[in-house]
Amino acid sequence: MGRALIAIGLLLVVLGLLVTIGEKLPFHPGRLPGDIYVRGKRASFYFPVVTCILLSVVLSLATWFFRR
């Protein structure tokens, strides 16, 4: 239980730093190359494919690391 709380706390710190300095980074979290963005006359559609894959890999590695 203690490791899980530490992991969640560290994840929140990293997410907080990304939100704080996210605009200064060379890439924008949530707007990575490969994400689908279609703009029409009346509507727009955004699907973050690469962002979802990257988030999945990071969470899978974190889960694997903390289960060991």
Image (spheres, rainbow, N blue to C red):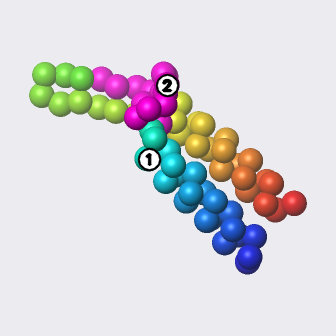
**Highlighted magenta segment, given as a residue range:** 23-38
Q: Nearer the viewer, residue 50 or 30?
A: 30
SS at badge 1? helix
Q: Position of residue 46 (x, y in %)?
A: 34, 33
Q: Is residue 52 left or right of residue 60?
A: left
Query: Which residue occupies 43% across, 47% down?
Result: 20
**Mark-to-mark CA distance, 2 and 1:** 14 Å
Report the amino acid beneath label 2: Pro
The stretch drawn in magenta includes residue 42: no
Look at the image and tell me in which quarter the C terminus lies.
bottom right
Look at the image and tell me in which quarter the N terminus lies.
bottom right
User: Magenta part mainly helix, strand or loop?
Assistant: loop
Q: Nearer the viewer, residue 17 or 3?
A: 17
Q: Position of residue 16 (x, y in %)?
A: 49, 53
Q: Is residue 42 left or right of residue 34?
A: left
Q: Is residue 32 left or right of residue 10?
A: left
Which residue is denoted by mark 1 in the rendering? 19
Answer yes or no: is residue 19 visible.
yes
Query: Which residue occupies 55% across, 59% down?
Result: 12
Which residue is denoted by mark 2 in the rendering? 26
Q: Write down the quadrant of residue 3 in the picture.
A: bottom right
Report the amino acid beneath label 1: Val
Q: Nearer the viewer, residue 37 or 2?
A: 2
Tally the numbered discs: 2
> What mark, if any, has residue 5 been given in the picture?
none
